[in-house]
């Protein structure tokens, strides 16, 4: 009896571990949406040069297992090399410099129809008076649950 | 051999001893008889040594301890006291022993009457003999209190010392930490942390920037003697913020009269090249006493068992496995002056903790950064981003005893000054700031507590009390996260512990708190572009927070019982606790650059209310003990930072909301002595959390600790060379995967990690206490694993690699 009691707790641990391995029935969304510019029409690709005054269609594919909700596009200068992109290509950066009148593009959009597939397609005109140089373009997307995915790419604005 | 024994008293003692020898047949007493018992009285001044023997853990008297010296002998009384009479001037060494405790050698220099010599024995795993203890031990008192709490001794703290106080305490089942690098961590009790755990030092609630992700505790872990941990709602005693538990760092024991102690601790570690020195002094003549401590630590970047970190699509290569820019340093000083006479005890302490810690440079929080700083040129420099923090504290603890009352008063003043620095970069409409001072918090806290403990009759122990606290928090820097605020809280409480019979005790208590938070307006220092509906564009300094005053009132209550049935103790406790919303929860409205998100407060939040049922069953017998402490907890309105699916200026909006939460879990512990040298300890902890309403219904809570078990083996070796009481310890932690997550968390795989340590006393100085040494090898196999509750888990940084540390404590 004493022996049994003494080692009783080893058994208890096994039981506890086993008991806790069960799962729940409530369905919750544990999947993030995805975002990609890595397809033929995806734009801009890494190291793309954008010409001042021109208009471009920024395109990215987003998917989710349940329901897409919103996305954003952020273009900001990288004159101080404060960040880098997550694409495969490594762009050669120009020398660091001080911003005078950099392009700042900050826009949010909702995906009204929800759905599980959507192509971001936003037309952006590069103003004539902005600083040329290294820029950074970041896309992000959320799903209805509140999961987010991001991707970013190094680009240049040239004359 | 047998000296002459002139007094009849000595003769009586010998007779008693011989009687015991026959009765108990203990070899120990044979050893006693080896000594002679006589007193010398030939033309010399004779003195007496008075003292007491105490349990080092509980500070309760030990009855029947043997105090044996050459030709001297005494046994401690019921109150732990002993007297050695007729002692000539000179230096004497005594051996103090008691079964179940580690035998201690003390040296006394006798040149006057020596009183209040206090001897602390440490509980050991040496053979336990059949002992009957009369009177109420500390263990007994703890058993009788229905509240489920755990006491942490100095011995535990020393044997398990890690880089920060909370890492040391995380070995206790149900306690875990949120770590920020190698030197900082904040407490988590049963999965809840931040402002839901109150940290109390010298009776005063420690007030820093505990709401923040990258904030640690600003407390010197050296020199702490005793910590009380309550794993459950404790608003009744501690007010708001103690909703999930309390880490109560008790005032150190008052030194005994005519004592003087100096100890120096030196620590070295290989993983982060840490060097630490801490020196403490305590002294007392008659009624006045003082203590002081200086601590300095300096460490480099810590090493992780990986060459590169993959975070989302980014790859960060690490130089020499160093987690770039995680070096730090800390300098702490404290001094206290106290007075202790008859019925009055008062101690005033001044302490200052100053630290500077670097943050991982490639990604702080969730923001990926590149920099022209050459981080890899040295692993000891602290570059941007870093924070520096200074915590200054004055406390006074005074107690006054009258016939039937004991009055306690605590006063506290704290100044917390924290600065976060990072490389200035433009963001959104914010141009590049001119300096690195991103955020500055200056917080002053004034506290006052009073309580009266009294016994209206022999069956009741009653306490009534009052807590008042006032805070004002000021901000500076170019980043905005929380507004300036003033906060006032006041609470009155009373509770009664009623002894139904000697084995059944009931505790009931009630508390009322009133408080207000007064938030201050804040406007951006730069203009943002607003596209108006009519097509025009305006440039405005956006308002981030408003002038608002919010009032809160709340009732807390607790009811519990304790029933002792021989070796088994049953405790049941039910309580209601609350927490006032913080100013950031109410009024934040800005970009958290580190987390790369937009955080929005909610001025309509109610105080959090929590109900918890705690059960604790403990069975302790001679050779083993086993205990289980399950709990069920319901939050009516848990305040939760909810990631929404909306954007603000391309950043995801996180909004403070309230949700019902259901939690269940507990701890299991067991301990057995296989033989007199080998001891096994095991514990398992688990918490299940569910949000049962709101936007994240069905999800768990952030930073939920996974199922985890700890198996500890302690083996006592034979004395060899200089090594006295050497012991080997191995801690094997098995942690299951954490599959329960909530956005933006990632699932974390399970792991096993082994830590080993060798502890010993070194008997180098003949007349002094021995040197204590500890050699500790953490993460023996250099396992790469992730801690789900680490701040750096979010960016896929694994835990620290193998670390060898050597700690030596030298008494003078």
Image (spheres, rainbow, N blue to C red):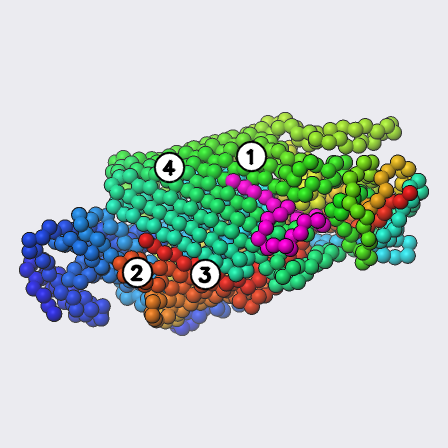
The residue under label 3 is B806
Q: Disc 1: which chain?
A: B
Location of the N terminus of chain B (image quadrant): bottom left
Q: Is residue B376 magenta?
A: yes
Cα separation between marks 3 and 4: 33 Å
Comparing marks 1 and 2, which lies closer to the viewer?
Answer: 2
Badge 3 and badge 2 both on one subunit: yes
Q: Secondary structure at mark 3?
A: strand
Comparing marks 1 and 3, which lies closer to the viewer?
Answer: 3
In the displayed structure image, the side of residue B157 where residue B782 appears, left or right: right
Badge 4 and badge 2 both on one subunit: yes
Crowd class of label 1 (few under 14; some 14 to 19; many from 20; radius 10 Å): many
Q: Disc 2: which chain?
A: B
Badge 1 and badge 2 both on one subunit: yes
Checking the image for residue B765, the label placed there is: 2
The residue under label 4 is B348
The residue under label 1 is B442
Cα separation between marks 4 and 2: 34 Å
Crowd class of label 2 (few under 14; some 14 to 19; many from 20; radius 10 Å): few
Which mark sits nearer the N-terminus, 4 or 1? 4
Cα separation between marks 4 and 1: 24 Å
- Where residue B344 sits, quadrant-wise, is top left
Comparing marks 3 and 2, which lies closer to the viewer?
Answer: 2
Q: Where are the magenta residues, as a range?
A: B364-390
Q: Secondary structure at mark 2?
A: loop
At which x and y percent is residue A50?
89, 46
Which mark sits nearer the N-terminus, 3 or 4? 4
Crowd class of label 3 (few under 14; some 14 to 19; many from 20; radius 10 Å): some
Cα separation between marks 3 and 2: 20 Å
- Kindly identify the residue that appears in the image at 37 percent across and 60 percent down: B772
At which x and y percent is residue B295?
44, 48
- Kindly identify the residue that appears in the image at 61 percent across and 45 percent down: B386
């Amino acid at each position: 009896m004493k022996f049994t009691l003494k080692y009783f707790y080893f058994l208890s641990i096994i039981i506890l571990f086993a008991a806790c391995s069960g799962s729940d029935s409530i369905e919750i969304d544990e999947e993030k949406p995805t975002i990609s510019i890595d397809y033929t029409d995806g734009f801009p690709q890494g190291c793309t040069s954008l010409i001042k005054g021109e208009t471009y269609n920024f395109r990215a594919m987003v998917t989710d297992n349940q329901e897409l909700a919103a996305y954003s596009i952020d273009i900001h200068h990288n004159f101080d090399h404060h960040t880098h992109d997550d694409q495969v290509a490594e762009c050669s950066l120009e020398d660091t410099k001080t911003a005078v009148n950099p392009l700042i593009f900050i826009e949010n959009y909702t995906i009204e129809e929800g759905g599980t597939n959507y192509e971001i397609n936003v037309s952006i005109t590069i103003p004539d008076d902005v600083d040329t140089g290294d820029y950074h373009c970041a896309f992000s997307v959320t799903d209805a649950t509140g999961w987010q995915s991001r991707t970013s790419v190094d680009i240049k604005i040239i004359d | 051999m047998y000296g002459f024994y002139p007094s009849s008293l000595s003769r009586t003692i010998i007779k008693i001893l011989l009687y015991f020898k026959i009765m108990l047949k203990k070899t120990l007493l044979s050893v006693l008889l080896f000594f002679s018992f006589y007193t010398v009285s030939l033309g010399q001044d004779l003195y007496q040594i008075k003292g007491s023997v105490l349990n080092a853990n509980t500070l309760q008297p030990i009855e029947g301890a043997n105090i044996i010296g050459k030709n001297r002998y005494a046994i401690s009384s019921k109150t732990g006291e002993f007297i050695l009479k007729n002692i000539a001037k000179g230096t004497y060494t005594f051996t103090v022993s008691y079964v179940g405790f580690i035998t201690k050698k003390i040296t006394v220099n006798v040149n006057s009457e020596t009183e209040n010599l206090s001897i602390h024995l440490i509980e050991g795993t040496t053979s336990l003999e059949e002992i009957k203890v009369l009177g109420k031990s500390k263990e007994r008192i703890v058993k009788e209190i229905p509240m489920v709490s755990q006491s942490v001794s100095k011995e535990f703290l020393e044997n398990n010392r890690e880089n920060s106080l909370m890492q040391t305490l995380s070995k206790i089942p149900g306690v875990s930490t949120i770590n920020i690098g190698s030197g900082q961590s904040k407490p988590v009790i049963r999965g809840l942390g931040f402002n839901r755990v109150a940290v109390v030092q010298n009776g005063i609630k420690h007030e820093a920037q505990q709401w923040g992700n990258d904030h640690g505790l600003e407390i010197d872990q050296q020199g702490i003697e005793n910590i009380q941990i309550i794993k459950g709602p404790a608003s009744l005693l501690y007010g708001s913020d103690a909703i999930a538990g309390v880490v109560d760092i008790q005032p150190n024991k008052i030194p005994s009269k005519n004592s003087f102690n100096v100890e120096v601790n030196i620590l070295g570690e290989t993983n982060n090249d840490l060097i630490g020195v801490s020196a403490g002094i305590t002294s007392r003549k008659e009624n006045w006493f003082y203590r002081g401590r200086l601590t300095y630590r300096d460490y480099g970047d810590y090493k992780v068992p990986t060459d590169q970190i993959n975070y989302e699509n980014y790859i960060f290569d690490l130089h020499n496995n160093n987690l770039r820019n995680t070096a730090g340093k800390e300098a702490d000083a404290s001094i206290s002056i106290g007075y202790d006479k008859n019925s009055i005890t008062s101690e005033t302490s001044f302490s200052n903790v100053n630290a500077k810690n670097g943050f991982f440079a490639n990604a702080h929080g969730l923001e990926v950064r590149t920099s022209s700083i050459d981080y890899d040129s040295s692993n000891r420099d602290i570059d941007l981003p870093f924070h520096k923090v200074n915590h200054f504290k004055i406390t006074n603890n005074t107690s006054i005893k009258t016939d039937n009352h004991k009055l306690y008063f605590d006063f506290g003043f704290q100044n917390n000054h924290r600065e976060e620095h990072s490389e200035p970069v433009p963001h959104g409409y914010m141009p590049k700031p001119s300096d690195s001072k991103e955020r500055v918090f200056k917080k002053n806290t004034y506290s006052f507590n009073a309580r009266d403990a009294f016994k209206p009759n022999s069956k009741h122990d009653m306490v009534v009390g009052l807590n008042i606290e006032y805070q004002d928090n000021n901000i500076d820097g170019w980043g905005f996260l929380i507004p300036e605020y003033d906060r006032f809280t006041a609470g009155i409480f009373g509770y009664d512990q009623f002894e139904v019979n000697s084995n059944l005790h009931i505790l009931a208590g009630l508390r009322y708190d009133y408080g207000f938070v007064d938030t201050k307006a804040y406007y951006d220092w730069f203009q943002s572009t607003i596209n108006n509906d009519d097509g025009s564009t305006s440039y405005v300094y956006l308002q981030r927070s408003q002038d608002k005053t919010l009032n809160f009132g709340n009732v807390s209550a607790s009811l519990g019982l304790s029933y002792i049935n021989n070796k088994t103790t049953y405790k049941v406790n039910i309580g209601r606790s609350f927490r006032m919303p913080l100013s950031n929860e109410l009024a934040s409205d800005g970009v958290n650059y580190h987390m790369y998100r937009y955080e929005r407060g909610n001025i309509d939040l109610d105080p959090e209310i929590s109900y918890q049922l705690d059960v604790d069953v403990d069975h302790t017998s001679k050779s083993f003990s086993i205990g289980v402490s399950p709990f069920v907890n319901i939050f009516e309105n848990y305040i939760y930072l909810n990631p929404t699916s909306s954007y603000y200026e391309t950043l995801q909006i996180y909004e403070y909301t309230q949700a019902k939460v259901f939690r269940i879990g507990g701890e299991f512990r067991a301990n057995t002595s296989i033989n007199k040298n080998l001891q096994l300890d095991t514990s398992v902890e688990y918490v299940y959390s569910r949000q049962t309403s709101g936007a994240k219904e069905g999800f768990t809570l952030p930073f939920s600790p996974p199922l985890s078990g700890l198996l500890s083996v302690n083996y006592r070796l034979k004395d060899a060379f200089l090594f006295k009481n050497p012991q080997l310890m191995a801690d094997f932690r098995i942690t299951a995967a954490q599959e329960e997550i909530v956005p933006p968390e990632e699932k974390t795989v399970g792991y096993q990690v082994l830590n080993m340590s060798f502890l010993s006393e070194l008997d180098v100085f003949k007349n002094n206490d021995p040197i204590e040494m500890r050699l500790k090898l953490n993460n023996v196999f250099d396992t790469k694993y992730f801690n789900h509750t680490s701040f750096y888990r979010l960016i896929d940084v694994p835990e620290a690699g193998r670390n060898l540390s050597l700690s030596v404590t030298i008494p003078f």
